[in-house]
Amino acid sequence: MQTSIRVLRRKGRHERTRKKVIGTADRPRLSVFRSHKHTTVQLIDDSSGKVVLSCSTGDSALRKQIRYGGNVEAAKTLGKLLAGQALSNGFKEIVFDRSGYFYHGRVKALAEAAREGGLQF
């Protein structure tokens, strides 16, 4: 099965971004992944190569609040949940990695909700 040109272009943007965006223990990288049904985010410490925190619209905690995980409303809810969990784990500043996706729609809604929740990036 061939990969579409759209996916290849996104992966190229993601590789260019990853050369510059690096998460540390004090300031982890917020990585975003979109699928058709869900949105997944991870806080990653690249210096140790570990995922510090992970949230998804497929998690049972969010499935009760949202009807469908692949829309802007679900991304807003996910951003607020992520901000609350990150602040409770002691992370106030993060580095945002949009993974090559354009900054609009779900990615923008997630980022703005995380900022409203108290994260700085």
Image (tube, rainbow, N blue to C red):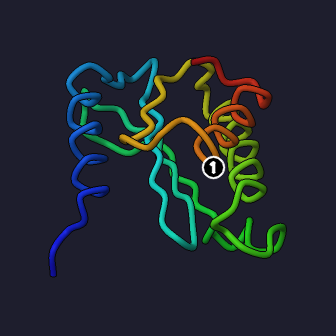
Occupied quadrant, residue 51: top left
- Give the quadrant of the C terminus: top right
Farthest residue to the bottom: give it. 1
Residue lying at 60% horizontally and 40% vertically, measured from the top left: 104
For this view, does 34 lie left or right of residue 21? right
Occupied quadrant, residue 88: top right
Q: Amino acid at mark 1?
A: Arg
Q: Which residue is mark 1?
A: 106
For this view, does 13 lie left or right of residue 67? left
Instruction: Identify which residue, 117 or 100, lies in the foreground.
Output: 100
- Give the quadrant of the N terminus: bottom left
Q: Residues within 10 Å of mark 1 (few under 14, many from 20)?
A: many
Farthest residue to the left: give it. 2
Is residue 42 shown above or below 2?
A: above
Residue lying at 78% horizontally and 31% vertically, measured from the top left: 117
Residue lying at 43% horizontally and 44% vertically, measured from the top left: 101
> Where residue 89 sits: x, y (%)?
61, 34
> Where residue 14 sits: x, y (%)?
28, 39
Residue lying at 49% horizontally and 58% vertically, measured from the top left: 34
For this view, does 41 lie left or right of residue 51? right
